[in-house]
Image: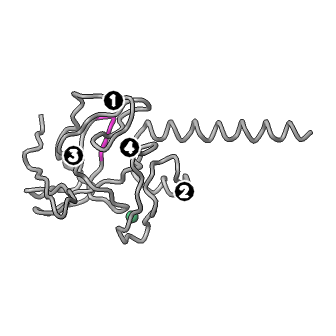
Amino acid sequence: MVSMETLTIKTENKFRSLVTKQAYTKGEVICEIPTEKLFDKANRYTVQISQDQHTEVGKLSALNHSCDPNVILDTENLLMVARRDIEKGEELSFFYPSTEWEMDAPFICLCGAGNCIHVVAGARFLPLSTLENHYLNRHIREMMIELLNHTETHLTTLKDAER
Ligand SMILES: [Zn+2]
């Protein structure tokens, strides 16, 4: 069991962030994603781990979004992994649409990254070309394929109606 003891929540002007007390190398497991409390809808304290499950993540709910993040949430193996080398004292962040299909509280991203997506509302609101540049969990891929298939069926129906 990899615990969250190396992680600490920092609060500044009511703005929370998650900071690491130790360094990690790329690919290293930082902690497990807790799954004791599951919900069928997203809230501010959950991470989506399958098409219909959202898990309360405790301390990890202080993770902020970044379009160029330093950690990955792998919801299949339920692990938080370093996406690159991370220094002691660094704030940890992940790409929210890599787990969230449709977010409870969308917001505007001002991360300044060259590939910034600006509107963070969940994967369903992003083009495939943008999503492909990020680590995506299996449930997000599955939901994207379902959405594309549905759109295709819809377009075919429209075409047929025109005839
Ligand atoms: Zn951004």
Residue type at mark 3: give it: Leu
* The quarter of the picture showing ligand 1: bottom left
Q: Which residue is found at the position 22% from the left and 57% from the top?
A: 92
- Residue carrying label 2: 129
Q: Position of residue 37 (x, y in %)?
A: 24, 28
Q: Is residue 162 above or below residue 110?
A: above
Label 3 neighbourhood size at 10 Å, few (<14), some (14-19), many (20+)?
A: many
Element carrying mark 3: helix
Along the horizontal axis of the image, is 51 left or right of 4? right
Residue 81: percent from left, percent from top = 24, 48
Q: Which residue is mark 3?
A: 60
Q: Label 2 neighbourhood size at 10 Å, few (<14), some (14-19), many (20+)?
A: few
| Contact check, label 3 and label 2, Cβ < 8 Å | no
The residues colored magenta run: 73-77
91 relative position to 140: left or right: left
Q: How many marks?
A: 4
Q: What whole-number distance in Å separates the C-alpha atoms at marks 2 and 1?
A: 30 Å
Amino acid at pointer 2: Ser
Element at label 2: helix
Amino acid type, mark 1: Phe
